[in-house]
Amino acid sequence: MNFVQKGFSTKDETSTDKVKYSYAEIPLNFIYNSQGFFIGAGPSMAFGIAGREKITDKSDPSNSSDDKIEFGSGDDQIKRFEFGANILTGYKFANGFIFSVNYNLGLNNIQIGNADDAGTIKNRYFAFKVGYVFGGNKE
């Protein structure tokens, strides 16, 4: 299981909007391993834990806001469940250390409402990972 943060920011002449989502993500990767190098792909499922949206009004800072994002099925909420596709590659050293890179593409729209009215939000991220496998000298 991974803890990941996803989000976006937009800005124009009058304001800046920063959105951050926190997810518990379970990737189900199929891995091919050869002499320490590995490559894999598979689906992922993510469950929204928390989120924040910070809007800064450049012309009138008193109009700025910092709000908690609500997950659910209401008009002002974001879908809690996200389904995605995951690819990764990396190297596992004989001592158990792992270095990998990962790309994840969200496949479902997490924005609630009619896509014509509300728009579409699909997450994606690129990650560098470092880890350790106990008993790392075993294949």
Image (cartoon, grey):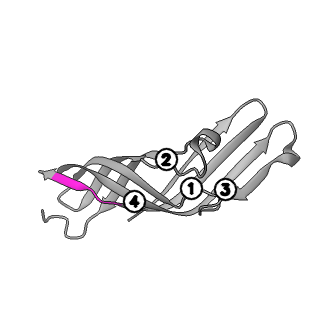
The residue carrying mark 4 is 45
Tag shown at residue 21: 1
First-in-chain label (1 vs 3)? 1
- The crowding category of the residue bearing disc 1, from other C-alpha atoms within 10 Å (few below 14, some 14 to 19, many at least 20), is many
Q: What element carries label 2?
A: loop
- CA gap between label 3 and label 2 equals 19 Å
User: In screen coordinates, is 118 left or right of 98?
Assistant: right
Q: Which amino acid does label 3 sit on?
A: Asp
What's the distance in space between the residues labelled 1 and 2, CA to CA?
9 Å
Q: What's under tag 4, amino acid-wise?
A: Met
Residue marked by disc 2: 123
Q: What residue type is labelled 2?
A: Asn
Tell me if label 3 and label 4 are in contact, CB under 8 Å: no
Give the main secondary structure of the magenta stretch: strand
* Among the 4 quarters of the image, the one containing residue 70: bottom right
Is residue 118 positioned above or below 28 on the image?
above
- Earlier in the chain: of badge 1 and badge 2, it is 1
Residue located beneath label 3 in the image: 75
Q: Are marks 1 and 2 in contact (CB under 8 Å)?
A: yes
Q: Is residue 133 left or right of residue 115?
A: left
Q: Which of marks 1 and 4 is in front?
A: 4
In the rendered image, is residue 36 in sight? no
